[in-house]
Amino acid sequence: MPCVAFFLDARLVGTDLSGADLTGAAMDSADLSNSTLKGTRLAGATLRHALFKGANLDSADFSNADLWNANFEQATNLDDSVRAALAEPFVVRGR
C-alpha cells in the first residue's frame, strides 16, 4: 500500500522519480520541470498548478489525478492517462 506523501510547492526540478509510487500524493504547485517520471504512478494525486515543463513522462500513470491548471509545456511522452486527466474536470472516484 502506498504511503500518503505531501509535496506542496516542492522544487523537484531535474529529479529522477522513475518507478516511484506517488499514488494519491498531494503535490499542488510542485515544480517537476525537466524531471524524469518514467513509469511513475501518480494515480489520484492532486497536482494543481504543478509544472512539468520539459519532463519525460514515459509510461507515467496520471489516472484520476487532479491536473487543474498544470503546465505540460514541452513535456515528452504524454500518454492517454495524462490526456484523460486534462480533458475532464476533477471527479472523486473510488481509489
Image: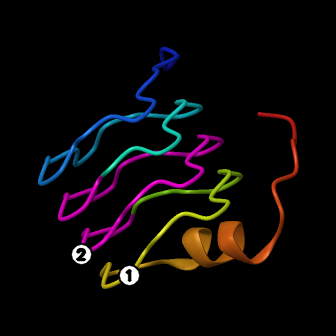
CA distance separating discs 2 and 1: 7 Å
User: Residue at coordinates 75% horizontally, 77% vertically from top-left?
Assistant: 87
- What label does residue 18 carry, if any? none
Q: Is residue 50 magenta?
A: yes
Given the image, on which type of amino acid does mark 2 rest?
A: Gly
Boundaries of the magenta span: 32-59
Label 1: few (<14), some (14–19) or many (≥20) C-alpha neighbours in 10 Å: few
Residue 73's disc number: 1
At a point 83% along the width and 63% down the height, the residue shown is: 89
Contact, CB < 8 Å: mark 2 with mark 1?
yes
Image location of residue 86, percent across then percent down:
67, 72
User: Which quadrant does the C terminus fall into?
Assistant: top right
For mark 2, what is the residue? 54
Q: Is residue 26 left or right of residue 40?
A: right
Helix, strand or loop for disc 2 = loop
Q: Is residue 37 magenta?
A: yes
Taking 68 as reference, is 52 left or right? left
